[in-house]
Image (tube, helix red, strand yellow):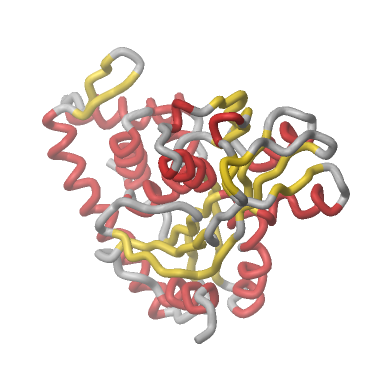
């Protein structure tokens, strides 16, 4: 049994899906399946039931999940202890970040950290808010950076910045009707949206709720997996979207998109980590760099 097999098992157990777990870990689906199969074959125990297209933990799998988490946590603590002994001259740090933060807010800050601590390797993965939360809970990432709300009670959440969402349509397209100044008629809009679990999708869900609607009551023309795909679709004339001003600033300035005034509060950028895991010197140094001064 290897730590890599345990890491794969935990990821699959948390997501209840081999392909999604493999993608989040940067593995192929056959490699993840082979790791699970090797564990089951070596110890003669079935860890998952295959139910239709999904999987569920067996009773043995549920019992093993607790032990697997404990082993991975101890391994992470041992690594952090060794890195503390070396100060910040060596070590590694895994960061999972949601898309807007990873692509527009984080790179300059990581460059500053690397310049100050060149011996520390930074491994960055990108997903939506829900995927980042799962990665930190499962121990696949030391730190998570998210734009949407988190739910797991074991996470510590710290404010690190703010973002402004804007409502955009293609240049030359009429602005959608409003029910009041700053309040678009969300049911009259043809929406282009991100996938479930993304921070911008959560904001639109909340906007619908405030109008007494469910998300399913909205007209959604396209669901796309990245901010850039959403921006390109709206630029081409497909519907409208709510999206970070970081993503569309150049397109708005160039006249390819038009921003429509919408009354929305700032969106929080937050850092999350697991309260029960020992943080390394490198982790604490990166937290100090990311948190706003004062």
Measured as percent of width and height from the top left, residue 294 is found at 50, 86
Residue 25 in view (yes/no): no
Seen in the image, is 90 located left or right of residue 244? left
Q: Position of residue 186 (x, y in %)?
A: 55, 36
Pinpoint residue 122: horizontal percent, then vertical percent.
Answer: 55, 62
Camera sees residue 259: yes
- 91 sits left or right of 190 in the view: left
Which residue is located at x 23 percent, y 46 percent?
Answer: 68
Q: Residue furthest front?
A: 180
In this view, the residue farthest toward the right is 254
Residue at the (51%, 42%) spot, across then down: 204
* Residue situated in front as seen by the camera: 120 or 50: 50
- Image height check: is 119 above or below 74? below
Assign the N terminus to one quadrant of the image.
Answer: top left
Q: Total number of numbered labels?
A: 0
Quarter of the image for residue 223 reads: top right
Q: Which residue reaches farthest top?
A: 52
From the viewer's perspective, is 200 left or right of 169? left
Front-lying residue, 89 or 199:
199
In screen coordinates, is 47 left or right of 281?
A: left
- Quadrant housing residue 228: top right
Give the residue at x 27% y 58%: 73
Q: Judge whether 243 appears above or below 234 on screen.
A: below
Q: Residue at 54% of width from left, 70% of height from top?
A: 120
Rendering quarter of residue 62: top left
| Residue 289 x %, y % | 54, 77
């Amino acid at each position: 049994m290897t730590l890599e097999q345990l890491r794969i098992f935990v990821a699959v157990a948390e997501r209840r899906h081999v392909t999604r777990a493999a993608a989040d870990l940067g593995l192929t689906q056959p490699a993840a399946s082979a790791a699970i199969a090797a564990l089951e074959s070596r110890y003669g125990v079935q860890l998952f039931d295959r139910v239709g297209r999904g999987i569920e933990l067996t009773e043995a799998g549920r019992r093993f999940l607790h032990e697997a988490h404990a082993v991975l946590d101890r391994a992470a603590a041992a690594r952090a202890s060794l890195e503390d002994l070396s100060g910040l001259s060596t070590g590694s740090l895994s960061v999972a970040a949601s898309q807007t933060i990873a692509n527009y807010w984080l790179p300059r800050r990581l460059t500053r950290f690397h310049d100050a601590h060149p011996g520390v390797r930074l491994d960055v993965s990108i997903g939506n808010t829900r995927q980042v939360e799962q990665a930190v809970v499962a121990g696949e990432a030391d730190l998570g950076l998210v734009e949407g709300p988190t739910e797991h009670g074991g996470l510590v959440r710290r404010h690190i910045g703010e973002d402004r969402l804007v409502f955009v349509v293609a240049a030359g397209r009429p602005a959608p009707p409003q029910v009041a100044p700053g309040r678009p008629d969300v049911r009259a809009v043809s929406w282009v949206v991100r996938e479930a679990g993304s921070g911008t999708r959560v904001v639109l869900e909340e906007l619908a709720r405030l109008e007494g609607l469910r998300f399913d009551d909205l007209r959604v023309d396209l669901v796309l997996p990245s901010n850039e795909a959403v921006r390109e679709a709206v630029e081409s004339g497909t519907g409208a979207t709510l999206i970070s001003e970081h993503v569309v600033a150049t397109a708005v300035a160039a006249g390819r998109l038009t921003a429509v005034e919408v009354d929305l509060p700032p969106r929080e950028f937050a850092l999350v980590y697991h309260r029960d895991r020992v943080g390394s010197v490198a982790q604490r140094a990166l937290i100090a760099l990311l948190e706003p001064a004062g």
